Image (spheres, grey):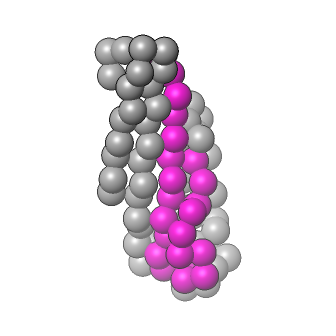
Amino acid sequence: MNLEFYKSDDAVVGVLNVRLVIRSARTLKDKRRVIKSLKDRVKNSFNVSISEVGTLDHCQYSQLGVAMVGNDKSI
């Protein structure tokens, strides 16, 4: 997992890169079901952009990219 924050006087940009192992997934369809559920929960809970960005062809591994932009300087 890699988390980075970029600050300026006007905006704060957060970028998160997460690698996952989905042991219960036996097919790509199983993996897509788990990833879609996780993406929907994260997006609704934290108001961020999230996408699967790597290891698309392996049924038990996934890499997600999460990004947020805000103007709150307290981060």
Asked whether residue 58 is drawn in magenta, I would say: yes
Assign the N terminus to one quadrant of the image. bottom left
> Majority secondary structure of the magenta segment?
strand
Residue 47 quadrant: top right
Q: Is residue 52 visible?
A: yes
Residue 8 position within the rendered picture, expressed as x and y whole percent measured from the top left: 41, 21
Q: How many marks?
A: 0
Between 31 and 6, the one lying in front of the other is: 6
- The residue at 39%/32% (across/down) is 6
4 to 1, vertically: above or below: above
Residue 15 position within the rendered picture, expressed as x and y whole percent measured from the top left: 44, 43
Assign the C terminus to one quadrant of the image. top left
Between 55 and 32, the one lying in front of the other is: 55
Q: Is residue 45 visible?
A: no
- The residue at 51%/53% (across/down) is 65
13 to 9, vertically: above or below: below
- The residue at 54%/69% (across/down) is 54
Residue 5 quadrant: top left
Q: Which residues are magenta?
A: 50-72
Asked whether residue 17 is drawn in magenta, I would say: no
Residue 13 position within the rendered picture, expressed as x and y whole percent measured from the top left: 46, 31
Between 27 and 52, the one lying in front of the other is: 52
Does residue 21 appear to the left or right of 49 in the view shown?
A: left
Does residue 37 appear to the left or right of 72 in the view shown?
A: right
